[in-house]
Image: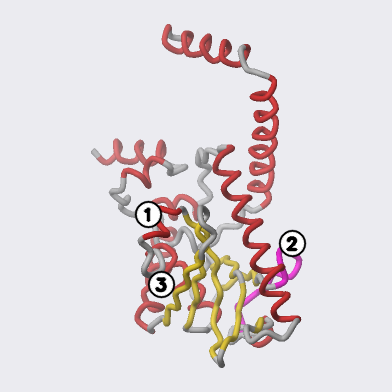
Amino acid sequence: MGLKNLADKIKKEQREANKSFEEKFIDEIDKFLVEEAKRKRSESSRLAFRPSQYYKCERQTFYFLKGVKGVDGIYPRSQRILQVGTRLHEWIQNDILMKMNELGYPIKILPKEELPFYGAEGVEIIEDHTAPPTEIKFIDFRFTEKFPISAMIDGALEYNGYPFIFEFKTINPNEFEYLIEPLPDHIKQGALYSLCIGLKKVLFLYLCKGTQNFKAYMVDYRDDQLEWVVNKIKGIEEQVLLDVLPDKEEDSLTCRFCPYSSICKKEELCEI
């Protein structure tokens, strides 16, 4: 062990020894959150295209579909954010949309049986997942050769005669203040949902975490946008099947949080 590592180790031990009762109490909660997240992650290991991933760095998706084990840091704060977001989803789905549907309000929940993709060959709807009744989780094998699309929508609704996919998002006040349309990442996620479900319209409902104000935006997807999704996932799958490493995305933020960054750097050195 080098001198710097030894000094860092001693400082860490000193910080731990000097922690107050309250700090240790919070540490216990954070420890639980991290361990639970690791346990759940080990249970969901299907190799598939995911809505929040497919449009990002192709090399990252390549490693994921290859089953490469990355170093994916799980941090207490990110787990708190994730779980608070989950509870807010349950609030809008169970306490609002489900109740409105039961009481006969104009916003209606569309059952999965009424959606265009229901019963289609190559579509598997997951029935045994623990989630609000409005959510629809599915695996779609129709657009790829080996790796399916694995996704879940927050709901499918009908209002004023328009059927649409419903997506609920929570964002920070800084983003919310200047929001005039769905965020680019969300538009790409919605395109994949639209492709699979068979509904062109996706409504994004945004909740500001700071003020609890709402903003809503409807996106009516065009055929060329859906074709882009198909070409994207087919292109990545072809590279995986042929074992051709894609170029990495030149985005320092993406690289910083990528679970495969150390592996990727080794690949770059080998190419020099």
Nearer to me, 260 or 211 = 211
- For mark 1, what is the residue? 57
Q: CA distance from mark 2 to mark 1?
A: 30 Å
The secondary structure type at the circle numbered 2 is loop
Q: Choose mark 2 or mark 1, whichever is in front.
A: 2
* 3 or 2: tag closer to the N-terminus: 2
Between discs 2 and 1, the one toward the N terminus: 1
Exactly how many numbered labels are in the figure?
A: 3
**Residue position for label 3:** 229
Task: Decide: few, some or many residues near mark 3? Use Cα within 10 Å; few <14, some 14-19, many ≥20.
Answer: some
Residue most extreme to the top:
3
Magenta: main secondary structure: loop
- Residue 242 lies in quadrant: bottom left
Q: Which residues are magenta?
A: 120-133
Earlier-in-chain disc, 1 versus 3: 1
Q: Amino acid at mark 3?
A: Val
Residue hosting label 2 = 130
Amino acid type, label 2: Thr
